[in-house]
């Protein structure tokens, strides 16, 4: 299947005045909404992502540690996640994007490496344009489960973070049918959160649901830092270091 152009992808993903079928908009389930900009020009998207809750221009490295229980064996797995904003940008569906390399370790063994792609609209909203995935076993790449890129197949950009998230905002972060369909809902704002990396204020809490896996987790984002805590169904992972 032909990879769609940037105009095709974002016009379909974010609305337009053309006739014919369009992709589903990220919609709110509550009274408040996190909808895409009415006039969305792909050329406006920038790899300079400086949203207070997704500060990729100022926070270049984050390290998370925690534990999670294996649902099959019941054993506790020690988790470490290292996330680094790369110096070089990339292009997805013609859009210049910031690139974040994420390495996931379980019991000190690398199990997954991803390259995540983000861009920001002038209204302040942050968009997620996909991820390249390498799954590892015993140091060797064994698969690419969950990999998707906007413009390939039916995949479209997802709204990663509204410009000003409010309680009740609901939005689709991943829009790759049958591959990645994660969506997020803002549950609370104005929170105080403490992790080994420090004390943070005016944070938000989201509920993230992955329908393909039927998994729910909670996440906390804080101004000037970004993600500081994840609470999967059987564990906790917290920010221990950032710069």
Image: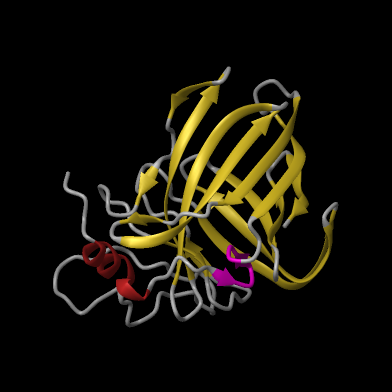
Q: Is residue 114 left or right of residue 2?
A: right
Residue placed most toward the observer, 119 or 17: 119
Q: How is the image coloured?
A: secondary structure
State yes or no: residue 53 in magenta.
yes
Q: Quadrant of residue 16?
A: bottom left
Name the residue rendered at 66%, 32% in the picture.
Answer: 105
Q: Which x, y percent locates residue 18?
A: 16, 76
204 lies left or right of 115: right
Task: Give the quarter of the image for residue 21.
Answer: bottom left
* Residue 198 pos. (x, y %): 85, 60
Q: Nearer the viewer, residue 211 or 129?
A: 129
Residue lying at 58% horizontally and 17% vertically, measured from the top left: 138
Tell me where residue 46 sits by quadrant. Answer: bottom left
Side (left or right) of 177 relative to 1: right
Residue range of the region highlighted in magenta in the rendering:
50-57
Where residue 102 appears, as percent x and y from the top left, is 57, 44
Identify the residue shown where x is 62% and y is 28%.
Answer: 110
Is residue 202 part of the magenta span, yes or no? Answer: no
- For this orientation, the residue located farthest to the top is 138
Give the side of residue 240 with respect to residue 108, left or right.
Answer: right
- Residue 138's place in the image compared with 67, above or below, is above
**Taking 77 as reference, is 193 above or below it?**
below
Quarter of the image with the N terminus is top left
> How many numbered marks appear?
0
Query: The C terminus lies in which quarter of the figure?
Result: bottom right
User: Residue 209 placed where, x, y %?
Assistant: 55, 51
Furthest residue toward left: 19
């Amino acid at each position: 299947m032909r990879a769609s152009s940037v105009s095709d992808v974002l016009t379909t993903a974010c609305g337009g005045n053309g006739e014919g079928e369009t992709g589903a908009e990220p919609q709110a389930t509550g009274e408040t909404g996190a909808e895409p900009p009415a006039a969305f020009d792909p050329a406006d998207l920038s790899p300079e992502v400086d949203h207070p809750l997704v500060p990729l221009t100022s926070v270049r490295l984050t390290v998370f540690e925690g534990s999670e229980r294996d649902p099959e064996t019941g054993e506790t797995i020690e988790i470490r996640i290292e996330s680094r904003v790369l110096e070089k940008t990339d292009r997805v569906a013609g859009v210049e994007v910031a690139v974040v390399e994420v390495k996931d370790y379980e019991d000190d063994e690398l199990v997954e490496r991803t390259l995540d792609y983000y861009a920001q609209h002038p209204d302040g909203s942050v968009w997620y344009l996909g991820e390249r995935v390498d799954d590892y076993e015993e140091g060797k790449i064994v698969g690419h489960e969950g990999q998707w890129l906007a413009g390939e197949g039916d995949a479209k950009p997802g709204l990663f973070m509204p410009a000003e998230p409010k309680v009740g905002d609901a939005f689709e972060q991943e829009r790759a049918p049958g591959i990645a369909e994660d969506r997020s809902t803002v549950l609370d704002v104005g929170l105080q959160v403490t992790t080994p990396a420090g004390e943070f204020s005016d944070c938000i809490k989201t509920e993230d649901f992955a329908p393909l896996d039927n998994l729910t987790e909670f996440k906390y984002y804080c101004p000037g830092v970004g993600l500081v805590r994840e609470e999967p169904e059987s564990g906790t992972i917290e920010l221990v270091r950032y710069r």
